[in-house]
Amino acid sequence: MYMLIAIAVTVLVIALAWRGIGAGTTDDESAGSPQARPSRPVRPRTRSVAPDDDPEFLREIDRKLRGEDKSS
């Protein structure tokens, strides 16, 4: 008996979820015509340089280690 109730509740939940997913479309759109997805804005590709790859950063660290830096 409990198994029958569990199956009935599962079918009910799936049916309601199915209708909820399809509720956002109109009859014209659900007739089989694919809906165009909005395109994402294109971000410019910038190359980020990690501090340990930046030559200026490495020169600055080298100067500090050698004691040539007068600012610190």
Image (cartoon, helix red, strand yellow):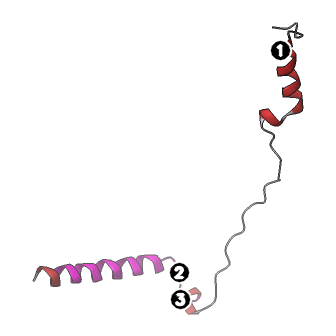
Badge 2 element: loop
* Depth check, front residue: 68 or 70: 68
In the drawing, does residue 5 fall left or right of residue 10?
left
**Which dot marks residue 25?**
2
SS class, disc 3: loop
Compared with residue 38, is residue 62 higher up or lower down, i.e. above or below? above
Queried whether the magenta region covers residue 8, the answer comes back as yes
Residue 60 horizontal side relative to residue 50, left or right: right
Tell me the SS state at disc 1. helix
- N-terminal-most mark, 1 or 3: 3
Instruction: Please rate how many residues cluster around mark 3, counting C-alpha atoms within 10 Å: few if below 14, some from 14 to 19, many from 20.
Output: few
As shown in the figure, which amino acid type bears the numbered disc 3?
A: Asp
Q: Estimate the x, y position of residue 39 in percent, counting from the top left.
A: 72, 68
Residue identifier under label 1: 64
Our reading of the magenta stretch's main secondary structure is helix
> Within 10 angstroms of label 1, few (less than 14), some, or many (20 or more) residues?
some
Q: Quadrant of the N terminus?
A: bottom left
Residue at left 72%, top 63%?
A: 40
Quadrant holding the C terminus: top right
**What is the x, y in percent for residue 27?**
53, 88
Q: Are marks 1 and 2 in contact (CB under 8 Å)?
A: no
30 relative to 9 in the view: left or right: right
The residue that label 3 is drawn on is 27
Report if the CB atoms under discs 1 and 3 are less than 8 Å apart. no
Give me the C-alpha separation between circle 1 and circle 2.
64 Å
Residue projecting furthest to the front = 66
Magenta highlight range:
5-28
Give the spatial CA distance, label 1 vs label 3: 71 Å
